[in-house]
Image (cartoon, grey):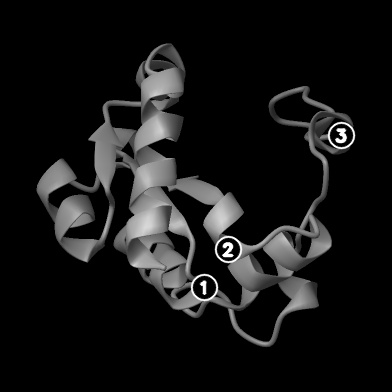
Amino acid sequence: MCGSAGIDLPSLADVLVTKEEAEASKPAPDLVIVAWEKLALTPAECALVGDTVYDAQACRGAGVVFMGVSSGGTPAELLLEAGAYGVWRDTGHLYADLDHALEQASLAAAASH
């Protein structure tokens, strides 16, 4: 249970990855790799939503498409320069555009492999 938000995160996720499961944290790709391995997926079948340049760097190193949100304070231009294939205002904006975003993420993954 995430006490501050009152959310039971484990019940909402297929897998959870913690910093204890990898040697290095972002910007290293270790945690992203652990996630796709736990999901039994390939990097091309995954996308990560993040709000920092470090998220983008970890995705690039793990071969995973990075979908940026600028609500964390990093400007969209920096997220795009770091490797985001697209940037949305926040997760609500991404959710509203999810079908299109996932279609584009699939194309981006195919183009990079």
- Which secondary structure lies at badge 1? helix
Residue that numbered label 2 is attached to:
43
Of callouts 1 and 2, the N-terminal one: 2
Q: Residues within 10 Å of mark 1 (few under 14, many from 20)?
A: some
Q: Say which amino acid is labelled 2.
A: Pro
Q: Residues within 10 Å of mark 2 (few under 14, many from 20)?
A: some
Quadrant in which the N terminus appears? top right
Q: Position of residue 25 (x, y in %)?
A: 57, 76
Q: Nearer the viewer, residue 19 or 3?
A: 19
Q: Residues within 10 Å of mark 3 (few under 14, many from 20)?
A: few
Q: In the image, which disc is placed on residue 62?
A: 1
Relative to 73, residue 27 above or below? below
- Which secondary structure lies at badge 3? loop
Residue that numbered label 3 is attached to:
1
C-beta proximity under 8 Å, tags 1 and 2: yes
For the residues marked 3 and 1, what is the alpha-carbon distance in whole angstroms? 29 Å
Q: Nearer the viewer, residue 1 or 25?
A: 25
Of callouts 3 and 2, the N-terminal one: 3
Residue lying at the far top in this picture: please name it.
Answer: 96
Q: Say which amino acid is labelled 3.
A: Met
Relative to 89, residue 48 above or below? below
Question: What residue is at 69 percent from the left and 61 percent from the top?
Answer: 36
**In the picture provided, is 102 more to the left or to the right than 22?**
left
Q: Say which amino acid is labelled 1.
A: Ala
**In the picture provided, is 13 more to the left or to the right than 64?**
right
Question: Which callout, 3 or 1, points to the residue nearer the camera?
Answer: 1
Would you identify the image quadrant in which residue 96 lies?
A: top left
Q: Position of residue 37 (x, y in %)?
A: 76, 67
